[in-house]
Image (cartoon, rainbow, N blue to C red):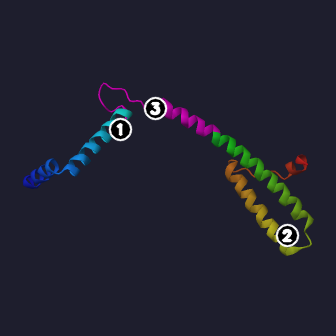
Amino acid sequence: MFKEALAFATALVTSPVAAWRVVVIMVGGGHIAWACGWLPGIQGFAMAGEVEGLENKLVAIETKQNIALRIALADEICRLHALRDQNVSNQPLWQTLNETFNNRQEDYRAVNNGIEYAISQCSAQR
C-alpha cells in the first residue's frame, strides 16, 4: 500500500498535467474554505446574514404568489360555479364542469390551509 502511494505521489510530481490538477484542486478548495470562513482567523465573505436575508425575501415572494394563486383560483371557482349552474340540462358538460370545479376546490384547499372556497363569496365578487 505504501509503495503504491509513493508511486502515485512520484507520478504527480513528474506529470505536469497531474501537478496542474492538484494545484487547481488546492486553489479551489482553499477558495471555498476562505469564502465559507473555515480557515482559522479569517472571516469568510459568504456571510450567514446574507443567507437569512435571501430566505426572508423568498418567504415574502412565496406569500405574494400564494395570495395571487388563491385569488386566481377563487375567480376560476366562481366562473366554473356559474357555468355549472347554467348547464344543468346538459349532463355530460355539467359533469365535466363539476369535476373541474371540484379539482379547483382541491387546489384552493391545498394553498389555503385546507379551507375550501366559500361559494357565497362568488356573488360578492360580481
Q: Quadrant of the N terminus?
A: bottom left
The x, y position of residue 25, in whole percent, is 28, 44
Which residue is tagged 2?
A: 94
Q: Residue at x 84, y 72 (%)?
A: 93
On the rendered structure, is 44 left or right of 51? left
Report the mark closest to the observer, 1 or 3.
1
Between 42 and 72, which is closer to the camera in this rendering?
42
Q: Are marks 2 and 3 in contact (CB under 8 Å)?
A: no
Q: Residue at x 38, y 34 (%)?
A: 35
Circle on res. 32 = 1
What is the span of residues highlighted in magenta in the rendered image? 36-60
Q: Secondary structure at mark 3?
A: helix
Which residue is tagged 3?
A: 48
Q: Amino acid at mark 3?
A: Ala
Q: Residue at x 17, y 49 (%)?
A: 12
Please tell me whether residue 122 is drawn above or below residue 63 in the rendered image: below
Is 44 magenta? The answer is: yes
Q: Amino acid at mark 2?
A: Trp
Between 86 and 37, which is closer to the camera in this rendering?
37
The number of callouts visible is 3
Among the two numbered marks 1 and 3 on one chain, the one whose residue lies closer to the N terminus: 1
Q: Secondary structure at mark 1?
A: helix
Q: Badge 3: how crowded within 10 Å, few (<14), some, or many (20+)?
A: few
